[in-house]
Image (cartoon, rainbow, N blue to C red):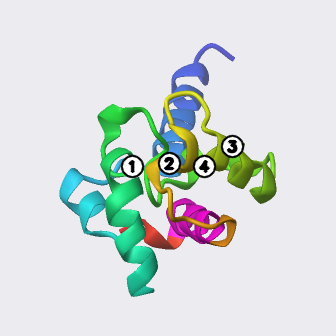
Amino acid sequence: MRRFRPVLLALLGLLAACSAEREPDRAQLEARRPADARLAALYERSCLLCHARPESGAPLTGQASAWAPRLARGLDALVASSRQGLGGMPAMGLCAECSDADLRALIEFMSSKENTP
């Protein structure tokens, strides 16, 4: 068993590296926008500042692993948290003109794996 341990550890390390989601660079994060022009404008004014900057601590746009535990609570709960504010995020995510439908669409955009390069 001892002689197999290094091989087993190496294989586990490779599996972890393969499944790990790499963090996109800042330029890639800042280039992403929703396809809808109105939502893109809301995203630029209210979401981009935190959700495109790793140092903010906010879940990054397109980084599914960071969004997964939040999405596990349900989209309605995320919309409510966005509306009320939670942790470091201010109420409405500083988007006073956003409706619940806008918040939902923005969350869906930011949490989508499809936005990962």
| Type of amino acid under label 2 | Gly
Q: Residue at x 59, y 70 (%)?
A: 102
Q: Which quarter of the image is occupied by the N terminus?
A: top right
Closer-to-camera residue (8/45): 45
Among the two numbered marks 1 and 2 on one chain, the one whose residue lies closer to the N terminus? 1
Residue ID for mark 1: 22
Left or right of 67? Residue 47 is: left
- Label 1 to label 2: alpha-carbon separation: 26 Å
Q: Is residue 34 visible?
A: no
Instruction: Report x, y in % for residue 30.
Output: 25, 60
Q: Residues within 10 Å of mark 1 (few under 14, many from 20)?
A: few
Main secondary structure found in the magenta portion: helix
- Mark sitting earlier along the chain (1/4): 1
Label at residue 93: 2
**Which mark is nearer the camera, 1 or 4?**
4
- The answer to whether marks 2 and 4 mark residues whose Cβ atoms lie closer than 8 Å is no
Mark 1 or 3, closer to the camera: 3
